Image (cartoon, helix red, strand yellow):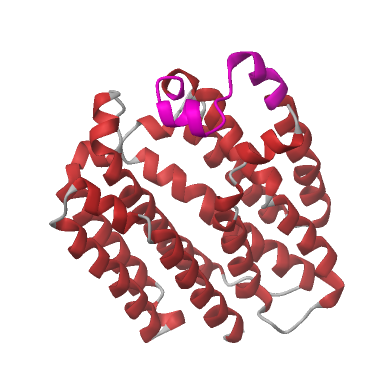
Amino acid sequence: MNTKRLLRISRPRFWIYEIGPYAVGIAAAIGLSGHLWILAPLLIFFVFFSYPANIYIYGINDIFDYETDKLNPKKVLYESLVVPSEHRKLFYHIAISCIPFLIYSYYIGSLHAFLALLAFFFFAGMYSALPIRAKAKPFLDSFFSAGHYIATAVFGYLLASNLTGQNISWNTLWISTIAGICWAMAMHAYSAVPDIKADAEANLQTIATWLQKRGTLILCTLLYVSAGLLVFPFLGFTSLVLSLIYVVFMIISLNTTEEQLFRIYTYFPYINTLVGMTIFFLVALGQ
């Protein structure tokens, strides 16, 4: 498998979804105060959460999704269908790309940071892989999807805290983690709504096929509001404003056609990026 093909499998357009939480985790620990002596280790894991982490996520996804992907014209014609003869080579490439970073984290970070990185590997891998394959189990699909994003943020926080000798606020960490899981679960559940018809035809059970459109959007609204309320003591009024932005999207999405809903969904990566940047600077400047 050549470099161009591997890069395509890693979905570069989605790298920001791992790099962003990692940056927020670091910001929560050290802000913008500048601890230059730990810059190199932190940058090494910025590298990890770009290509290696994403070839792990999407490579495993493509290996275990082959039976459904081969029936998808979009996957066959426009994306990289990973055929069975390539699975072993891709698996070895994933291992070679990721294991050195896992070993490195064990030697430079705390045990807690190492466990957080293991949690990333567990949730990201078992989202697609057997024996769990959470993506085909309603509610587990959203929870496992959220799990690896939030594990990334927690890893960034614990690693930066350990390297700088900062005291860890476990109470704040747990509350923020629960809020992050609520937000990320809502993001995943909403992304499944435009696929309800296709997933049902493919006999794939997801949180959206189980709750249907209205039920899923109501759940997303509750999750976004919960996330905003949980972090209100840390981010203040801004957290409620950010939650309200998503609630408005959920309300608009209630009475839409499938085509209109998909068009609204295409704006979500931009909204998520802007919200993520806002949270990053609020957290960083608050340190």
Residue 100: percent from left, percent from top: 81, 41
Asked if the stretch drawn in magenta spans residue 86, the answer is yes
Q: Which residues are magenta?
A: 69-90
Please name the predominant secondary structure of the magenta segment in the image: helix
Where, quadrant-wise, is the C terminus in this rendering?
A: bottom right
Q: Where is residue 61 drawn, in percent x and y?
A: 53, 32
**Which image quadrant is residue 167 in?**
bottom right
Label count reads 0
Depth check: 24 or 29 in front? 24
Q: Residue at x 36, y 67 (%)?
A: 227
Residue closest to the far top: 85
Residue in front for this viewpoint, 118 or 60: 60
Q: Quadrant of the N terminus?
A: top right
Judge by depth and name the residue closer to the eye, 226 or 136.
Answer: 136
Residue that sits furthest to the front in the current view: 77
Instruction: From this view, report whether residue 9 is shown above or below residue 149.
Output: above
Quadrant housing residue 96: top right
Residue 67 drawn at (x, y percent): 45, 18
Please report the residue visible at 45 percent of the width from the left and 28 percent of the height from the top.
133
